[in-house]
Image: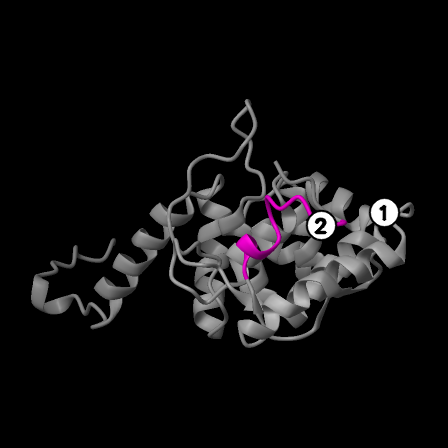
Amino acid sequence: MPPPETMFCSQQINIPTGLPEVLKNFTKAAIRTQPKDLLVWSAAYFEALAKGETLPVKERLEMNFGNQNNDAMLTPGLLKTLHKQLSSAETCNREELQDKWKALCLPLEQLENMLILGNFGIVISCMEFFALGCSALGDTSLKVACEILTEDEEGGAARIPFEIFSLVCTYLASLDSEMPQGHIDSFLASLEPQVKLQHGMIKPLDFIHREDMKPPCDSSD
């Protein structure tokens, strides 16, 4: 004999106090991030939430940077999110990077091409991969690095420490076998007087659109 139907009322259903807030935050995060595969991204979101890790969430909604087929591709917002997830340590392993990349619904082919270009092994420098990501965005990579790493408000000067800027610039230039080391050293040295006036910080206006300064790893418009 089947058990009798159980009647529920609102008093019998126990809804956790924090659930509405969790769902509201999740919805806002999904709208900002616009993942191509909502199911994959949602699983990664709640796993990171449960572990207290940095969430795979963009800070703000971006315009579509995908190709004509509307495929998901790396964007400044996604690169910033990925860097925040990985930068708690100087290095990460290849498997961890692949997991974070897939959680953001980015194409593995693009990741593999970047890993080959950077000649990365099992252990990967987070800052070097970030620099390569800036280059992959198809814009002035040093300017993109400043805009992503800055703690200035959006639309501000986009200042970052010159030490980090030098690391990004030197690494990207090293990928060009025809780039003389002297050109890299000369470019960085030419920036130091202005950097000293800015207490060790540098901003895009210090190095772009200037005839006497041509970044060795960028093609400025």
Q: Can residue 31 be seen in this view?
A: yes
Above or below, comparing residue 219 to residue 80 in the picture: above
Q: How is the image coloured?
A: one colour
Total marks drawn? Answer: 2
Does residue 214 appear left or right of residue 104 in this picture?
A: right
Does residue 10 appear left or right of residue 70 in this picture?
A: left
Which contiguous range is marked in magenta? 203-216
Q: Residue at horizontal 72%, vertical 58%?
A: 169
Q: Residue at horizontal 49%, vertical 41%?
A: 37
Does residue 119 appear left or right of residue 139 in this picture?
A: right
Mark pair 1, 2: CA separation: 13 Å
Q: Mark 2 points at which residue?
A: 215
Q: Which residue type carries mark 1?
A: Asp
What's the magenta bit mostly, secondary-structure-wise?
A: loop
Does residue 30 appear left or right of residue 176 in this picture?
A: left
Q: Are marks 1 and 2 in contact (CB under 8 Å)?
A: no
Quadrant showing the C terminus: top right
Residue nearer the viewer, 38 or 57: 57
Q: Is residue 90 magenta?
A: no
Quadrant showing the N terminus: bottom left
Q: Residue at horizontal 46%, vertical 63%?
A: 55
Element carrying mark 2: loop
Q: Where is residue 200 in the image (x, y as percent from the top left)?
A: 59, 75
Above or below, comparing residue 133 to residue 19 in the picture: above
Mark 2 residue crowding within 10 angstroms, few (<14) / some (14–19) / many (20+): many
Q: Which of marks 1 and 2 is nearer the N terminus?
A: 1
Q: Which residue type carries mark 2?
A: Pro
Q: Mark 1 points at which residue?
A: 176
Q: Quadrant of residue 67?
A: top right
Element carrying mark 1: loop
Q: Can residue 87 be seen in this view?
A: no
